[in-house]
Image (cartoon, rainbow, N blue to C red):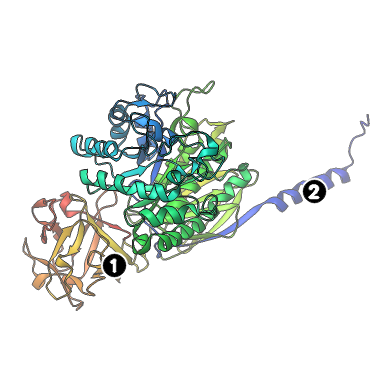
């Protein structure tokens, strides 16, 4: 062994090499955020998780509180392929499968979903009838809708028809989904069997939709499609073409299950594919579902990190959720509750402890609450993800995801469309919060200073998510200055009724009355908000081109609100005052003690909107949401 001491020259060289290596691998990235833009709004059921009736601790006293704290808005039931063997009426499964007797629909709703403040997404049994001698029965599905929404009043909106029907054996040795529309279970006999085809699935889905909507016409019904340009969309016949051409005019949404796979490095790059997937899906819907295609929503009711564990799962989950949602997807459900989201029977870890993806969902919920607007944001490096949101309370949020497991990233964030305060709140979670596979601590919160009007700099540690929340600066915000709502087009929703600000009868003439009505995306329910400076805004109807107006410039309680040709009058200038939870008082400049009010605090369709002294009622509070 050579025990000779190193020379000073050798030590200097070693030190220089170490410094060179550190500099060579140091990361710096510029991201660009335009808070004046609008992509999509966070939907009411955006952040979801899958649940399964074979889960032995699904009905646990702590699950609901964990879901609420994690920002979960939707919970899917009864779970994947189990949906096609599950009888909701007596809480049993067929084909020799196991389920936990506690995991009944009523227990799920009463113990988990409702206490969590979430909503269920239900997959009805397409594969088998209760007698196990044929395909799913539309009458059984319709009875479930009636029980859930009419008898119990639980208001479940989204109902999937079957799960992954492409796996029923029609296309060959891909035979995992139970489907008794053809009774012979011999794999060779099922290949190419017309009763199992995507065309048959589409044809059979229509009576399901009709039967379920006969019980509750407000629900949405959907079917599972293939990932566009992937198997079996690329098979002959094309799965999506055959399916959608037979049910496209009847359905309200389609479903994709997305498990991109790969090791941690590859997995963390896959959210970059999502915008292209959504675009391809919309293209197929427009091509195969005809004129109705543009109205069909997309849900991702299963997604996950595969075999990857540890900090990378948090980064992936947040990026996965947000990449779909900012591209207009209505719901994303992580797979599944007690298989990677919360712990179950993990050595040394208490059941129902948060796993990595749980914190991904929590951070996503901190970034965007329901109705808040995703804005365009881009990164100069594939090792750094970025998402940004214009908040309902006037704040501006940026999430930075460092996908590099070894190196911190010094990020310069260039901002347009907003004026930022000089400091804000920093939320952070990542590699330092883990002890091996599982988190050992929660999201940290601190103050970040040194934020300039148009940019700020932040160093994001390796394998970490940093979320910056900043209030508007003294120069105002919202792309026009002097206010808290960004210039743009919105639907304006009343807090008390949940109904939209609407030009009655969709008329366009001066003095047409304003009322409240269920939002239906028509132009008489869309409003363009433009800053006029000094904290005042115009609100102009998209369909009419007329300004929201206090009739006759009146100031008395009960004065009519109408539309009128823009004339720069004080009765057409409005200011916004944040109340709570993303809602605002809307005040005319000619009557500053008053506000936009739903007459009588009514929740009925067609109730008139009037002027009234502000009293803090929910009927006087409004949210601005992407239309």
The residue under label 2 is 17
Quadrant in which the N terminus is drawn = top right
Give the SS element for disc 1.
strand
Look at 25% across and 44% down and name the residue there: 211
Of callouts 2 and 1, the N-terminal one? 2
Point out which mark residue 66 bears: none
- Mark 2 vs mark 1, foreground winner is 1
Q: Could you classify mark 1 by the number of other residues whose Cα lies within 10 Å: few (under 14), some (14-19), or many (20 or more)?
A: many
Contact between labelled residues 1 and 2, with CB atoms less than 8 Å apart: no
What x and y, as percent, mark residue 413?
52, 59
Quadrant in which the C terminus is drawn = bottom left
Task: Please name whichever residue, 19 or 59, is drawn nearer the observer in this view of the structure.
Answer: 59
Task: Please name whichever residue, 474 or 89, is drawn nearer the observer in this view of the structure.
Answer: 89
Using the rendered view, name the quadrant where residue 523 is placed: bottom left
Q: Could you classify mark 2 by the number of other residues whose Cα lies within 10 Å: few (under 14), some (14-19), or many (20 or more)?
A: few
Q: Confirm whether residue 423 shows in the render.
A: no
Give the SS element for disc 2.
helix
Task: Please name whichever residue, 63 or 136, is drawn nearer the observer in this view of the structure.
Answer: 136
The residue under label 1 is 529
Q: Confirm whether residue 589 shows in the render.
A: yes
Is 531 on the left-hand or right-hand side of 398? left
What x and y, as percent, mark residue 142?
26, 40
163 vs 2: above or below = below
Is 522 on the left-hand or right-hand side of 478? left
What x and y, as percent, mark residue 536?
25, 68
Q: CA distance from mark 2 to mark 1?
A: 57 Å
Is 564 on the left-hand or right-hand side of 433? left
What x and y, as percent, mark residue 436?
59, 30
623 vs 157: above or below = below
């Amino acid at each position: 062994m050579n025990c000779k001491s190193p020379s000073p020259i050798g030590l200097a060289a070693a030190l220089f090499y170490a410094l060179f290596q550190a500099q060579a691998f140091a990361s710096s990235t510029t991201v660009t955020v335009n808070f004046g833009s609008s992509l999509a709004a966070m939907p009411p059921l955006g952040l979801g998780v899958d649940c399964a009736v074979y889960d032995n601790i699904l009905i646990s006293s702590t699950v609901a509180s964990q879901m609420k704290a994690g920002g979960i808005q939707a919970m899917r039931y009864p779970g994947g392929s189990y949906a096609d063997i599950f009888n909701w009426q007596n809480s049993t499964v067929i084909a020799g499968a196991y389920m936990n007797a506690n995991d009944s629909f009523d227990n799920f709703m009463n113990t988990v979903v409702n206490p969590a403040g979430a909503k269920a997404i239900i997959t009805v049994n397409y594969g088998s009838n209760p007698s196990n001698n044929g395909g799913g029965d539309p009458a059984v599905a319709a009875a479930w809708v009636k029980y859930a929404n009419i008898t119990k009043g639980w208001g479940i909106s989204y109902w999937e028809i079957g799960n992954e029907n492409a796996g029923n054996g029609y296309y060959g040795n891909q035979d995992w989904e139970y489907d008794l529309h053809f009774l012979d279970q011999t794999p060779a006999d099922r290949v190419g069997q017309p009763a199992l085809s995507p065309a048959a699935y589409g044809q059979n889905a229509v009576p399901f939709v009709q039967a379920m909507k006969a019980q509750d016409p407000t629900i949405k019904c959907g079917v599972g499609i293939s990932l566009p340009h992937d198997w079996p969309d690329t098979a002959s016949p094309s799965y999506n073409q055959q399916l959608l051409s037979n049910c496209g005019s009847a359905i309200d949404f389609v479903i994709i299950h997305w498990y991109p796979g790969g090791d941690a490095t590859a997995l963390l790059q896959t959210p970059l594919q999502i915008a292209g997937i959504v675009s391809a899906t919309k293209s197929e819907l427009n091509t195969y579902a005809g004129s109705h295609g543009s109205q069909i929503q997309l849900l991702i009711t299963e997604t996950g990190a595969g075999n990857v564990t540890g900090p990378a799962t948090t980064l992936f989950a947040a990026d996965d959720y947000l990449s779909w949602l900012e591209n207009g997807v209505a719901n994303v459900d992580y797979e599944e509750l007690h298989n990677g989201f919360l712990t179950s029977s993990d050595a040394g870890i208490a059941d129902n402890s948060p796993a990595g993806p749980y914190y991904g969902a929590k951070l996503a919920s901190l970034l965007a609450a329901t109705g808040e607007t995703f804005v365009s944001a881009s990164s100069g490096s594939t090792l750094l993800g970025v998402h940004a949101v214009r908040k309902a309370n006037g704040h501006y949020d940026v999430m930075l995801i460092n996908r590099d497991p070894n190196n911190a990233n010094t990020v310069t964030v260039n901002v347009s469309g907003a004026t930022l305060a000089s400091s804000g709140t920093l939320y952070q979670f990542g590699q330092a919060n883990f002890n091996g596979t599982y988190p050992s601590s929660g999201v940290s919160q601190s103050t970040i200073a040194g934020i300039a009007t148009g940019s700020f700099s932040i160093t994001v540690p390796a394998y970490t998510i940093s979320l910056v929340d900043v209030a508007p600066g003294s120069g105002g915000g919202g792309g026009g200055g002097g206010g808290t709502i960004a210039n743009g087009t919105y639907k304006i929703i009343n807090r008390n009724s949940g109904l939209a600000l609407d030009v009655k009868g969709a008329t366009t003439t001066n003095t047409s009355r304003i009322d409240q009505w269920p939002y239906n995306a028509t132009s008489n329910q869309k409003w363009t908000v433009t800053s006029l400076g000094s904290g005042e805004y115009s609100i102009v109807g998209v369909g009419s081109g007329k300004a929201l107006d206090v009739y006759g410039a009146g100031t008395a309680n009960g004065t009519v609100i109408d539309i009128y040709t823009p004339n720069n009058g004080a009765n057409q200038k409005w200011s916004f005052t944040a109340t709570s939870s993303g809602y605002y008082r809307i005040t005319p400049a000619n009557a500053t003690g008053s506000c936009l009010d739903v007459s009588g605090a009514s929740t009925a369709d067609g109730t008139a909107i009037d002027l009234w002294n502000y009293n803090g009622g929910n009927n006087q509070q409004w949210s601005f949401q992407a239309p």
